[in-house]
Amino acid sequence: MVNEDEIIKKILKGNPAEFSRLYDAYIDKIYRFVFFKTRHKETAEDLTSDIFIKALSKIQTFNPDKASFSVWLYRIARNTVIDHYRTRKVTLNIEDAWDIVSPDNVADQAHANLSLRQVEQYIQKLKPEQRDLVVLRVWEDLSYKEISEIMNKGENSLKIAFSRIMRTMRKDIGPIAMVTFYLINRI
């Protein structure tokens, strides 16, 4: 476990090389978060690099009394992706996104891909804040408290919103697609 406060203190005292420990601790999580929102490997890689560069260059603005480092970093990530979409027109290629079953069983793969497409299409139709909530809760496995700090929303309202989204999703796309949705996030 990384002691983020100690690492940040070392960085602020003139040892920026310590940032690599924070980078190592969060790179996979931030990349997954960005990839889900962009659906493009190279774009996700570029934005993830930008996010960590911004974090290092703005580390002196981090205030542990306001939020944890994780929340602060996810805010930077979320804002970077929003800025990306504001400045560029992006096309999504669904074929780049998933490979969740073994190619040995073509029937299972076809069924899983169909279910996953249903889930993907459904999630893309959600409002951006709803989509962020689902990504942070399911893909990133963050607590409602952390999501509340990232999105500047109350925990209870997020719990209610997530519950409504899941209930509507189950009704709209069916239980098989929902099972696929949960399984791909636990692999």
Image: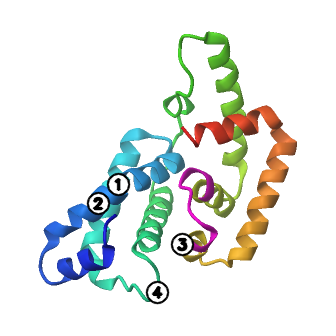
Neighbor class of circle 4 (other Cα within 10 Å; few <14, some 14-19, many 20+) is few
Q: Which quarter of the rendered picture does the C terminus lie within?
A: top right
Viewer-nearest residue: 46 or 161:
161
Label 4 belongs to which residue? Answer: 66
Residue at left 43%, top 69%?
A: 70
Of mark 3 and mark 4, the one earlier in the sequence is: 4
Residue 90: % across, % down: 50, 45
Identified by mark 4, the residue type is Lys
Question: Per the image, is 142 magenta?
Answer: yes
Of mark 2 and mark 4, the one earlier in the sequence is: 2
In the displayed structure image, the side of residue 15 where residue 43 appears, left or right: right
- C-alpha gap between disc 1 and disc 4: 22 Å
For the record, the magenta segment spans 137-145
Label 2 belongs to which residue? Answer: 23
Identified by mark 2, the residue type is Tyr
Check residue 150 in the rendering and tell me which mark sits there, or answer none: 3
In the displayed structure image, the side of residue 161 where residue 95 appears, left or right: left
In the displayed structure image, the side of residue 48 where residue 88 appears, left or right: right
Residue 174: % across, % down: 83, 36
Q: Are marks 3 and 1 in contact (CB under 8 Å)?
A: no
Identified by mark 1, the residue type is Ile
Label 1 belongs to which residue? Answer: 27
Of mark 3 and mark 1, the one earlier in the sequence is: 1
In this rendering, is residue 185 above or below 30? above
Check residue 10 in the rendering and tell me which mark sits there, or answer none: none
Q: Are marks 1 and 2 in contact (CB under 8 Å)?
A: yes
Question: Per the image, is 141 magenta?
Answer: yes
- C-alpha gap between disc 3 and disc 2: 19 Å
In this rendering, is residue 34 above or below 104? below
